Amino acid sequence: MQHHRRKHTTLAATAALAVVGVLGACSSDGGASSDEATGDAPGGTYTWWDPYPQHEGSSDWEGRVQQCGEQAGVTIERTAYDTTALTNQALLAAQEGTSPDVILLDNPAVSTLADTGMLTTVHEFGLDTSAIDANLLDAGVLEGDAYGIPIGANTLSLYYNAEILSDAGVDPASITDWDSLTSALAQVDEAGHRGITFAGIGTEEGSFQFLPWFWGSGADLTDLASPEAVEALELWKGWLDEGYAPNSVINNSQNTVWEEFLTGDFAFAENGTWQVNSAAEAEFETGIVQLPGKDGGVAPAPTGGEFIVAPVQSDTARYDVTRQIVECMTTPEGFVETANTFAYYIPPTAEGQEQLTAENADLEPWVEAVQNAKGRTSDNLGTDYPKISEALWTAVQNALSGAATPAEALEAAQANAEAATS
Amino acid sequence: MSSTPTVVGSRHEPRGTAGTRPAVPPGRRRRRTLNPSQWAAVGFAAPLLVYLAVFYAYPLWRNIDLSLHDYTIRAFVQGDAEFVGFENYLEIFGSSTFPTALLNTGLFTIGSIVFQFSIGLALAVFFRSSFRLSSFLRALFLVPWLLPLIVSASTWAWMLNSDNGIVNSVIQAFGGEQINWLTSPDTALLSVTIANIWLGIPFNLVILYSGLQNIPGEVYEASSLDGAGPWRQFWSITFPLLRPVSAITILLGLIYTLKVVDVIWVMTTGGPGDASTTLAIWSYREAFGTGMPSFSPAAAVGNLLIVIALVFGFLHLQLQRRQEAS
């Protein structure tokens, strides 16, 4: 009976997704192997999903995952998906009751999946999270329970083109608040260069890039129409109107932003830790300054990066080995090793950060940025965040394109967010 | 593997109905109705019936089911969605996006079809008279069809880029002003429509061209003997004789255009704001475009699209029947 119902829902899920438009390639290959390995914990096969398809079977990352399996006395079967596909796959697997043992999940998705009841809490697993930076752990906390551990974090900062700045006579150290940044842009503009580029696209990336300015003004995601929020949007809009930022930022993804910056035309670009290596290889000298808050200080940028989570299993005997695998990934040495394997992760513990900066002092500003960063789903927003974010990026698009003033756009956004989350 | 039992289950159904219908008297006669050749007939029909049930009827039913329940993400996993009747439909009709999306869908569809069809027809007539390189040129016109959509849509997006796009640099070279093709609410829909017209021309060209091949040459000869010029020939011969082919071309184009997601999504993601959001884009965004999938409203919008397409389908059938009758 149980068996039969499961088949039925498999088909239901496949069909549903096929109809709405995504290929429901959801056969239960992940589940099949976990079924085979049922019971006999040591020596079995444990399934592992992550969003790193760029790391193949022969990569350092694969080796690192297998090493953690060996230490726990099991084989790990790793499957890599694209980030968005991973969330959908996880949902389908949970519906079928064939979840993998371990998932590395993009942090804003953690509370979404936790809300479905498909994830175990860190507490249930008896894992110690006291060493993890609270601002990073928060992204995976729903109603007081942590549902995963960050394996590393990245965030946004302001890259600059040192050649343009010296040509325009701007000292990067002078950029400490919004006013000094805007006047730096004016100077660059006068010197005949392009000012700044960022991503205002109508997807999560748009909200991700706007949040440092939004939070840096003192605004809060629970009130999108506050005067502070309007000021933040007016800042962006002002840059567009003055010509400091190109009009195409409205459709820019973060990748496009980076491509624009690499042309060498732009003085500044807002982008993430993951471009550190690319910046070092650029044909011009680059550097970063912290994203400034409105009246100085470092603005909180949103955290990026994956959490390691353990979905609920019908066979709870598996948890013991799963815990060993998770622990292997979250020791200080484990964090540093992950950071070095990926080159774009900052460890989420003070100890790990110290080790990393001892090995690579260049990453120090990024450690500072990560320490100031803030989870998008924190402040107990949890599953409300995606709805608020959609309203926010729509407002950014409407204001930048001139369809509405920043104040009107944000008022409409607040109304939409309230309607969607109530 | 996992779908096999369901397949067997639904195979029983058609078999059962096929068996019971003639079997009014019970017992032995019923047995006789299913003689080996009839078994074979059922067996041959079964794969098709199963295919139709699994890949057409079931997804359609499931989409309706999704739209009538409140499938939050939690309910999706746990399978306990609350039945809410037409609440999802009321929600989408009351949404501020609805009038915009409906209007955009109308403008996008009509704009695309009118230009795709007329340009396609003009080219088909042009290529009817064979000349040197005509087949080579005709093949070139198929390029938009052969390119993966992601490639052509990205190329259009680059060409129409506000600051670095080639279109604006040409306009500015002739002293014009920069036009924010994809980033202004006034031109975003126009831009994606233009790209979609370009994509749709080959389809119209190919079907109308093959329709032209079926018009006998003698008709043209006779008309030219009667002194009809090319313009008169087109309106009095080509256009009326091409009417059945035109009708099906327009109908298919309509259905294809109603559900376009990819081109718009790649070029503008439906933005800025909702400026280029059509019903199809809206449905996709609700389901997959945000961090929180809302399958139920997405399915409701999807069903609305199916209904719109069906209305036009029936309209076409009606027209065809009237044509055949007269």
Image (spheres, helix red, strand yellow):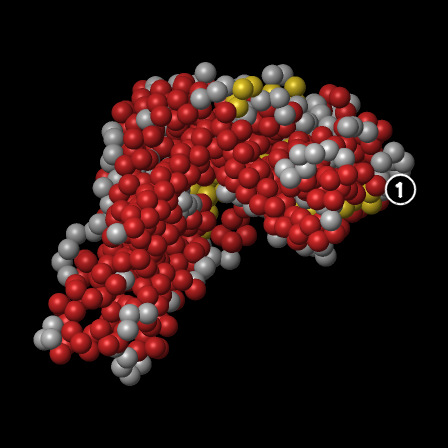
Q: Position of residue A230 (x, y in %)?
A: 31, 25
Which residue ends up furthest to the left in the rendered image?
B227
Q: Residue at x 81, y 27 (%)?
A: A316
- Residue B145, picture quadrant: bottom left
What residue appears at the point 29 percent right and 48 percent down from the top-left corner? B322
Q: Nearer the viewer, residue A325 or A2?
A: A2
Q: Quadrant of the N terminus of chain B?
A: top right
Q: Is residue A22 visible?
A: yes
At label 1, the amino acid type is: Gly
Q: Nearer the viewer, residue B44 or B106?
A: B44
Question: What is the chain letter for disc 1?
Answer: A
Can you see residue A220? no
**For residue A77, side relative to residue B206 (left or right):** right
Q: In the visual, does A350 lie left or right of B64?
A: right
Query: Which residue is found at the position 32% from the left and 26% from the top?
Result: B96
Q: Residue furthest bottom?
A: B132
Element type at mark 1: loop
Residue A15 vs A193, above or below: the answer is above
x then y, percent, for residue A379: 52, 19
- Where residue B192 appears, x then y in whole percent? 31, 49
Residue A165 vertical placement versus B225 (above, below): above
Task: Return the residue at label 1.
Answer: A43
